[in-house]
Amino acid sequence: MIKEFVDVLIIGAGPAGTMTAAKLAKSGLTVKIVERSHFPRYVIGESLLPQSMAHLEDAGFMPALLERGYQKKIGANFKQGPFQEFFDFSNNYTEGWTWTWQVPRDDFDNVLALEVQKMGVNIEFGTTVTNVNFEPEHPIVQVVDEAGTHKEVQSKFVVDSSGYGRVLANHLDLNEPSSSPVRGTIFAQFKPENGVVEGEENGKVTILVHAEDVWIWFIPFSDGRVSVGFVGNPEVLKSPDGDDETHFLTLLSQNENASQMIEGLTLCMAPKAIHGYSKGIKQLYGKNYVLTGNASEFIDPVFSAGVMFAIESGAVAADLVTKELNGEQVDWEQDYQQHMLSGIDVMRTYIDSWYDGRLKSLFFSVDKPEKIKRQITSVLAGYVWDRSNPFVSRSERTIDLFVELTSGETETSSA
């Protein structure tokens, strides 16, 4: 069996893995990524948040990403029937980036992977982890490629960025049921019938309320394509006869806002469905390993936080791994697990209050004070660690307070 030794082995080449790899490589460590699939490959999670931009810049990705000409995203638009509310990222409460991108993830993830390879990181695509052993001082991970070649990779530290694969969670019995209700999604892409559709809606992610427990996303890309998906009650989203395309188009036709937004667009991708996607985890770290991105915990995509948490976890984990391998003391519980969970808990509060109706009531309320809207916008931009924002530090209480103050009032403000 082939044997190899590196400082850090990363499982998975998505945004969490490549962010970790880039920062570790910049610190002078030898890094290897094993990735089960081949890039480019299609995944969802196409709407980024401004909070991630500083990390992308710090890791050295920004020049390559700017060259791609991705659709600039300036805010989030929410619609329910005739009511709508636009949250402009340039008017958020927290200091930081005020815009981001909407990206085809196959291209975006591939650009990040190519860049870390230029930094000297070895990525082995088409390679699957078959076993892990954390008993030795330096963990041993066994892998096999598509040609059947087996290899042992020994490293000082293992970072699991395997996403839905949840490699270490499965091998180390770290999985637990999610605290979130079971939900599903069905999604596809459309393209314009005649050229690229221009308009101010291109610079926004749009969220439509479809039913009490179902919502729709619209994410325009710079090449004219639009990602469209439903999320919510799986009983509503599951096709009764297995015909996902007909069911998907029927659901869209039932929503007046959605019907208007796909006017002039034609389906260019067969709809895909995922049900029961949320996962829980017992712990995010252990001796010589850490879980990042969706390998740690995946929550509902209503506020586009998936890639943001992946990038944040990769950046924070890389800094802590570097310190530990340099002989410094690291408090993984406080500086990693509690840090990540505090942001996830804020976003989970918003997700729960979205589905139970409280946040919709607040979003569409009349005459919200400007400061309140700025504070909400800051959370929607991903700044969920800014404790000076009461919608972060006391998220549940603050939402309840302002819902009570604004109950019964709705607005018809235009985006």
Image (tube, rainbow, N blue to C red):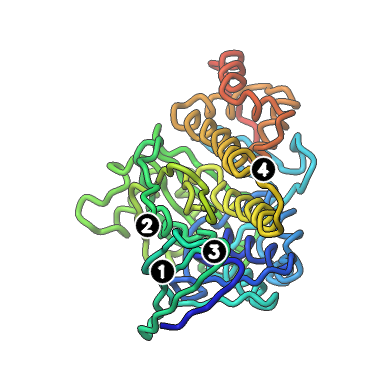
Q: Which residue bears the numbered disc 4?
A: 381
Is residue 407 visible to us here?
yes
- The mark closer to the camera, 3 or 1, is 1
- Please indicate whether residue 132 sits to the left or right of residue 83 in the image: left
Query: Where the C terminus falls, by quadrant?
Result: top right
Going from the N terminus, do you reach mark 2 or mark 1 first? 1
Q: Residues within 10 Å of mark 4 (few under 14, many from 20)?
A: many
Q: Give how far across and how far down residue 100 sits, in percent.
A: 69, 54
Secondary structure of residue under mark 3? loop
Secondary structure of residue under mark 1? strand
Amino acid type, mark 1 = Val
Distance, label 4 to label 1, CA atoms, is 35 Å
Q: Which mark is residue 31?
A: none
Going from the N terminus, do you reach mark 4 or mark 2 first? 2
Q: Which residue bears the numbered disc 2?
A: 171
In-front residue for pair 412/400? 400
Distance, label 2 to label 3, CA atoms, is 20 Å
In-front residue for pair 84/375? 375
**Contact (CB < 8 A) between labels 4 and 1?**
no
Amino acid type, mark 3 = Gly
**Contact (CB < 8 A) between labels 2 and 3?**
no
Q: Which residue bears the numbered disc 3?
A: 14
